Image (cartoon, rainbow, N blue to C red):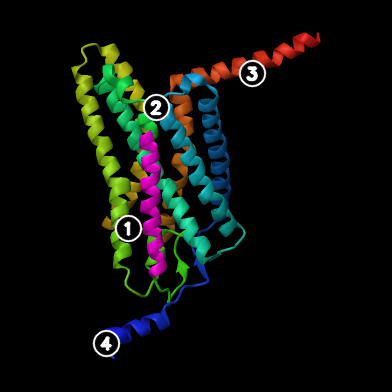
Amino acid sequence: MGHEHQAAIIFNATFVRPAKFYLNGFSNIPHVKYYYVFLCFVYAVTVLGNGFLISVIYLVKALHTPKYMIVFNLALTDLCESTALIPKLLDTFLFDRKYIVYEACVSYMFFVLFFATMQSWTLLTMAYDRFVAICFPLRYHAIVTKPAIAAILVFTWGFLVSLVAFCVSLIDRLSFCRSLVINSFFCDHAPTYKLACNDTSLNNIMAYVVFVLVLCIPLILIVITYICIATALIRIASGEERVKALKTCTSHLILVAIFFLPIVSTNIASVATYIHPNARIINSSLTHTIPALLNPIVYSLKTEEVLSSIKKLYKRNRLSNTAPSKQLM
């Protein structure tokens, strides 16, 4: 019997798929229940804000444009990510249900990672929209059409579902014969696969591939689009037109900063210096939850089209409510 065959038999005999994992995030953090109350508030505002923005875009026909198809997609993604993460997080730690079934853990990992990646690529699609609007204003309505944006969004959903599903499916080939304690606040990819006692090199490679495809490339492309936008704005002779064009980008720039800055700074800090596990967990949880909270607020308050649409809806509802009361009189 060859050494390779013997090794295969030993591996098959010792391959362990655990029934449950134990989530160890937020352990030994003083006054952590106040943080859970804060997350409850974040989730409530996130659901209300994104639900309201989705409703406004759906109800107001003037917002049925390619640009607001992207905004609708971002709001839907934010709503789904928060719903995938926060209720389960609160159930786990607030009610001390830290054991999670293996299959549930893998599903949890997929949905949180997928909707997080969707945010990144949706922001890139927004950057493309602003790039065409400012650099090719005369051709904007010919290039950025509803079918074109629908095709981009469908491709994005399909590509990211496949990418994240493949990355998560690689967990199934791992044997967990040592610790089953995940040092994170959810079934995060890296803290989970690093618990395995067999070869995790493919998981490690895929983690880097996803990081590059989901964060690095979108951020680099967004920076390039804004360099092109800045160049186009410099060529605009009129100062008023320059300011008007720049205003259309402010909401998007705020969203990009809210999403990318915490993630990039956390990853740089973790490589450059030592970060306490509790500080990393809190920072990571805020990175996953705060952008979804702020995105609808930024778009509702910073975009004149949305504000005017909200006013129109309010007036329409007011008129519809006053009409029956006049008939009764």
Q: Tell me the amino acid under the disc marked 1.
A: Ala
Q: Amino acid at mark 3?
A: Asn
Boundaries of the magenta span = 151-173
Q: CA distance from mark 2 to mark 1?
A: 34 Å
Q: CA distance from mark 3 to mark 2?
A: 28 Å
For residue 272, above or below residue 313: below
* Residue at figure coordinates x 45%, y 57% from the top left: 109
Which of the two discs, 3 and 2, sits closer to the camera?
Answer: 2
The image position of residue 322, as x and y in percent, is: 71, 13
Residue that mark 2 sits on: 146
- The amino acid type, in three-letter code, at marker 4 is His
| Labels 4, 3: front one | 4
- Whether the magenta-drawn stretch holds residue 157 is answered as yes
**Rendering quarter of residue 74:** top left
Q: Residues within 10 Å of mark 1 (few under 14, many from 20)?
A: some
Residue placed at 30% from the left, 31% from the top? 128
Q: Earlier in the sequence, mark 1 or mark 3?
A: 1
Q: Residue furthest right?
A: 329
Magenta stretch holds residue 43: no
Residue denoted by label 3: 317
The quarter of the rendered structure image containing the C terminus is top right
At 33% from the left and 20% from the top, the residue drawn is 141
- First in residue order: circle 2 vs circle 1: 2
**Occupied quadrant, residue 328:** top right
Question: Counting residues from the N terminus, which is met first, the one under dot 4 or under dot 3?
Answer: 4
Nearer to us of marks 1 and 4 is 4
Residue of label 4: 3
Could you tell me the amino acid type at mark 2?
A: Lys
